[in-house]
Image (cartoon, grey):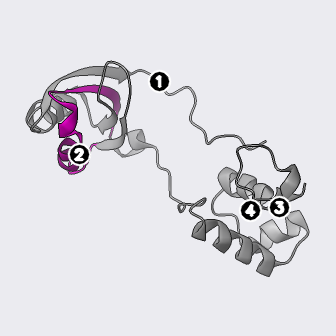
Amino acid sequence: MKNSEVKKGINSEIDKLDLDILRILMDNADTPFTEIAKTLVVSGGTIHVRIKKMKDMGLIKGSYLSIDPQKIGYDVCAFLGIYLEKGSQYHDAVESLKKIKEIVEMHYCTGAYSIFAKIICRDTNHLREVLNENIQAVKGIQRTETFISLEESIKRQIELD
C-alpha cells in the first residue's frame, strides 16, 4: 500500500510497512527489532528508522509493562463519575487528582460527569478511604458516583486495518 492508498484518517506519512510494524508491537511491545525485520522481510536498520520516525511523530508514545493488579493484592477496579462545581475548576481538579496513585486513568468528558476516572484499590475499605479522604477532599469536586467493575471483559488496543 502506497501513501496515496493509505486509508482516510491515517497520517499520510504512515505506510503499510509502518502499520505492519505497529501491529506486531501492539501484540507484543517486547518483540525484538530483528524478529520484526525477519517477519516483514526488511533490515533491522529499516525497523529502527521506522520506529524512530513514528516516535518522533508522536504516533508511538512509548511501551509499558502491563501487570495484573489482582496478583499484587489490588482486587477492586472502580469507575468514578466526578461532578465539578464549575467547569472552570477542571484543570485545578486534575492537578490534585493526579497525586492520587489509585487513579490509573482519567478522562474529561461530555455528558453527566465532568471527569470519568478508573481507580484500582486493594479492597472496598481501601476504595472508601480513597473516595472519602482523597477524592472528595479535592477542591471543586461537588460529588462523585462510583461503579465497581465485576469483571473486565475486553481490554485491547485499537485494531489497525
The label nearer to you, 1 versus 2, is 2
Residue type, mark 1 in image? Glu
Q: Which of the two discs, 3 and 4, sits closer to the camera?
A: 4
Which amino acid type is shown beneath numbered disc 4?
A: Glu
Please give the range of residues in magenta: 74-102
Q: Nearer the viewer, mark 1 or mark 4?
A: 4
In space, the residues marked 1 and 3 are separated at their CA atoms by 36 Å
Q: Are marks 1 and 4 in contact (CB under 8 Å)?
A: no
In magenta stretch: residue 99: yes
The residue nearer to you, when weighing 155 against 83, is 83
Q: Position of residue 143 (x, y in %)?
A: 16, 23
Q: Residues within 10 Å of mark 2 (few under 14, many from 20)?
A: few
For the residues carrying marks 1 and 3, which lies nearer the camera in this image? 3
Q: Distance of mark 1 from mark 2, alpha carbons? A: 31 Å
Q: Residue at x 72, y 77 (%)?
A: 49
Reading the image, the residue beneath label 4 is 13
Element under disc 1: loop
Look at label 2 and name its amino acid. His
The answer to whether residue 138 is left or right of residue 54 is left
* Residue under numbered circle 3: 17
Looking at the rendered structure, the kind of residue marked 3 is: Leu
Q: Can you identify the residue that label 2 sits on?
A: 91
Residue at image position (34%, 27%) is: 79
Q: CA distance from mark 3 to mark 2?
A: 39 Å
Q: Which residue is mark 1?
A: 151
